[in-house]
Image (tube, helix red, strand yellow):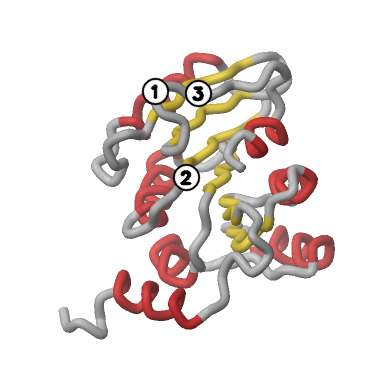
Amino acid sequence: MTFVDNPEVRRTVRNLLSPQRASGKLRCADLYCGDGFATRVARAAGAEVAYAYTPDAGEAERYLEQYGQEPFAGNISDSSEVAPEFDLLLVQVGNWDTQVMIRHVRLLMQGRGLAGVVFWGKGLSNSYITDLWYTVARIPELPEGFTGGTFHDDDLSLAVVSNTHGDSFPWPDVVTLETVIAAFE
């Protein structure tokens, strides 16, 4: 592989040439964006959504209509190459292959100084979200110093991996996706 063929080098050069953080806001990527719930919540929390991904072309069209931003709808390797820099990765956990989702997260983490990753979903079991957190906490791309944990109730399940909070993630008094995103600012 030549220097120019290296996807990490291409992404770094592209990101150096594109304006970032012009708004000074936390920049999020909405992975498996679906109907855009995480995008809506991130914007409500004062964050900017720099990138969205969906494996479904129909969802991509609806997302574009609703948010005026076209999500990437290609394969996960291409997704990691075209994604701009961002600080926080929001990953909707749903009815897709968990191993593919984890591989996608790993690809997006490579070469990025992320503040964290938030896996979220509705109707997930506590054991599923805990297993997911332990799987992510063991991936090689996770630099030293990342901490986190899980939250589960009847409405929402979250697994947070954070690089910005020292020994433990500061769970808000009222845990919602919005308050967890705001904790990263």
Identity, as a three-letter code, of the amino acid under mark 1: Asp
In the rendered structure, find residue 167 and report the number of the disc placed on it. 1
Q: Farthest residue in the left direction?
A: 1
Observer-nearest of 3 and 16: 16
Whether 19 is drawn above or below 36: the answer is: below
Work out whether 20 lies above or below 31: below
- State the SS at label 3: helix
Which residue is depicted at the point 79% across and 45% down? Answer: 44
Residue that carries the numbered disc 2 in the rendered image:
115
Q: Quadrant of the N terminus?
A: bottom left
Mark 2, other Cα within 10 Å: few <14 / some 14–19 / many ≥20: many
Q: Residues within 10 Å of mark 1 (few under 14, many from 20)?
A: few
The kind of secondary structure element at disc 2 is loop
Circle nearer the N terminus (3, 1): 3
Q: How far apart are marks 3 and 2 (CA)?
A: 20 Å
Residue type at mark 2 is Ala
Image quarter of residue 20:
bottom right
Residue at label 3? 129
Residue 110 drawn at (x, y percent): 33, 56
- Corner quadrant of residue 183: top right
